[in-house]
C-alpha cells in the first residue's frame, strides 16, 4: 500500500478484504456442513477469479424459473471434477459456480452475495455473470473493436471482430471503460495512457482553502474562507471538492463551481451564486486554474520521484512484480496530472489572448 502512494486505492482494497471476510461468515453460516472448512484464502481466490474472469450474460437469477435446472437446460454443464475439498462442495452447493451475483466494477455487497449463497433471487439483471474458458484469456485494451456478448438464440457467447485481423495479430477485447485503479484492483495490471483513468483529488479542499486564505489575507482571511466554505456546503457542493475526480481533460462542473465560490471576487460571491456555475470573469478563472495547477504539482510531488524514473525501474528485471505494478500506477497518475496541468496552461494562454475565459476545462 505504501508503494502505491494511492490512499483511495488502498482504502478500496481494504474494503474489499473486509467484504470477503463478511462473505466468509455468511458462507459458513448458510453453506452447509462443508462450508466450515472454507478458508479466507480460498474464498479470496475464488471471488477474485470471478471478478477478473466473468462475462455478463442475459441469464438473470431473479427472473422467473431461472433455477439451476432451467439454466442447465439452456446449455448443459460439463460434469464437475471430483471434489477435493470442503470448499469445492460448499461452492457447488451455493450455486455460485453457475451464476455469480456480482457487478463490475463495483464489488458485490454482502446482501447480494448472501442471496447467491442461499439461492434467493437477485432482482437485478446486471448481476448475471458467467465464466467462459478461453474467452477469458483475451487481453484488455481500451477502445478495442472486438466484442464478446451472449447470443440467446445461439445459446452461446460469441466473439466478433470489429475490424479485419492480420495473421498473428493479437485480438483484444475491452473489459469496460475502467480507470487504472479498477484495472489494478480487479485484474492486476495497469494500462498505459488509459483514456478512462482519473485521479481522486485527496486533499483538494485543504489545498484550495490555503490558496484562498493567501488571496484574502488583507480582506478577512480565515473568516472569509470559513464563510465561503459554508456557502459551498449550503449548495451541496462539498463532495464536489472532497471527492473530485480529475482527468487529463479537466474536472467536473461541480468542482469548478466550488472553486469559483472559494476564489471568486467578493462581488461575485455576494451576488447570484448560480452564476458561478459558469465562468464570470477571467481573473477568477485564472485563480481557479492556478490553484488546480498547484494542486497537480503538489500531488505529483507527494507520489515521489520522476515519472520516467518510475517507468525505468518498473521495466527492470530486478524489480519485484508488486513494486513494478505500484510504480506503473504512480507513473500513470503523474502522467494524468501533468497532462491536466498542460491543458490548464493552454486554456489560460488562449483566454488571455482573447481577453475573456474561453473554457473551464470541464469533463464532458
Image (tube, rainbow, N blue to C red):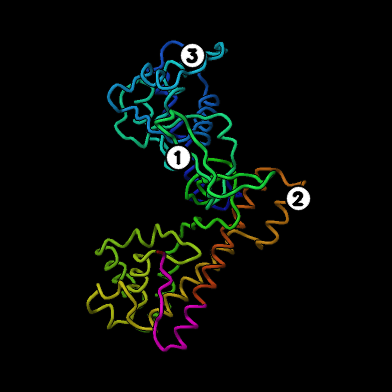
Q: Earlier in the sequence, mark 1 or mark 2?
A: 1
Relative to 218, 76 lies left or right: right
Q: Could you say whether the residue bearing mark 1 is in a helix, strand or loop?
A: helix
Q: Quickly name the residue at label 3.
A: 89
CB atoms of marks 3 and 1 within 8 Å: no
Range drawn in magenta? 346-363
Q: Quickly name the residue at label 2.
A: 316
Relative to 334, 31 lies left or right: left
Q: Residues within 10 Å of mark 3 (few under 14, many from 20)?
A: some
Q: Is residue 347 part of the magenta span, yes or no? A: yes
Residue 137, located in which quarter of the rendered image? top right
In the picture, which quadrant includes the C terminus? bottom left
At which x and y percent is residue 243? 40, 57
At which x and y percent is residue 284? 38, 80
User: Disc 2 to disc 3, how far (Cα)?
Assistant: 43 Å
Kindly identify the residue that appears in the image at 52 percent across and 21 percent down: 39
Q: Residues within 10 Å of mark 2 (few under 14, many from 20)?
A: few
Kindly identify the residue that appears in the image at 36 percent across and 37 percent down: 126
Number of callouts in the render?
3
Q: Quickly name the residue at label 1.
A: 15
Relative to 220, 175 lies left or right: right
The residue mark sitting in front, 3 or 1, is 3
Residue 150, located in which quarter of the rendered image? top left
Relative to the observer, which residue lies in front, 136 or 257? 136
Amino acid at each position: 500500500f505504501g508503494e502505491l502512494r494511492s490512499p483511495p486505492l488502498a482504502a478500496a482494497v481494504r474494503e474489499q478484504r473486509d467484504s470477503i471476510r463478511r462473505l466468509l461468515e455468511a458462507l459458513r453460516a448458510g453453506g452447509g456442513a462443508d462450508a466450515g472448512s472454507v478458508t479466507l484464502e480460498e474464498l479470496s481466490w475464488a471471488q477474485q477469479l470471478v471478478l477478473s474472469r466473468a462475462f455478463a450474460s442475459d441469464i438473470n437469477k431473479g427472473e422467473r424459473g431461472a433455477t439451476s435446472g432451467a439454466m442447465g437446460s439452456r446449455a448443459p454443464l460439463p460434469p464437475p471434477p471430483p471434489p477435493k475439498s470442503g470448499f469445492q462442495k460448499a461452492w457447488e452447493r451455493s450455486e455460485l459456480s453457475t451464476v455469480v451475483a456480482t457487478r463490475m466494477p463495483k464489488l458485490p455487497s454482502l446482501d447480494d452475495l448472501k442471496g447467491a449463497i442461499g439461492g434467493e433471487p437477485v432482482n437485478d439483471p446486471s448481476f448475471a455473470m458467467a465464466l467462459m474458458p478461453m474467452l477469458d484469456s483475451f487481453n484488455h485494451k481500451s477502445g478495442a473493436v472486438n466484442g464478446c456478448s451472449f447470443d440467446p438464440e445461439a445459446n452461446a457467447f460469441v466473439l466478433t471482430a470489429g475490424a479485419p485481423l492480420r495473421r498473428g495479430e493479437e485480438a483484444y477485447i475491452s473489459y469496460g471503460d475502467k480507470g487504472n485503479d479498477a484495472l489494478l484492483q480487479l485484474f492486476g495490471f495497469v494500462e498505459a495512457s488509459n483514456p478512462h483513468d482519473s485521479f481522486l483529488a485527496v486533499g483538494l479542499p485543504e489545498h484550495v482553502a490555503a490558496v484562498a486564505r493567501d488571496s484574502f489575507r488583507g480582506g478577512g482571511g480565515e473568516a472569509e474562507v470559513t464563510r465561503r466554505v459554508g456557502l459551498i456546503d449550503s449548495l451541496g457542493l462539498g463532495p464536489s471538492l472532497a471527492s473530485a475526480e480529475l482527468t487529463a481533460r479537466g474536472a467536473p462542473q461541480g468542482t469548478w463551481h466550488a472553486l469559483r465560490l472559494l476564489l471568486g471576487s467578493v462581488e461575485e460571491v455576494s451576488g447570484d451564486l448560480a452564476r458561478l456555475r459558469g465562468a464570470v470573469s477571467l481573473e477568477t478563472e485564472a485563480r481557479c486554474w492556478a490553484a488546480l495547477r498547484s494542486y497537480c504539482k503538489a500531488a505529483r510531488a507527494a507520489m515521489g520521484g520522476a515519472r520516467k524514473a518510475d517507468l525505468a525501474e518498473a521495466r527492470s528485471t530486478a524489480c519485484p512484480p508488486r513494486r513494478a505494478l505500484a510504480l506503473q500506477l504512480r507513473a500513470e497518475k503523474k502522467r494524468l496530472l501533468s497532462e491536466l496541468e498542460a491543458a490548464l496552461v493552454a486554456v489560460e494562454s488562449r483566454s488571455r489572448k482573447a481577453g475573456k475565459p474561453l473554457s473551464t476545462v470541464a469533463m464532458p
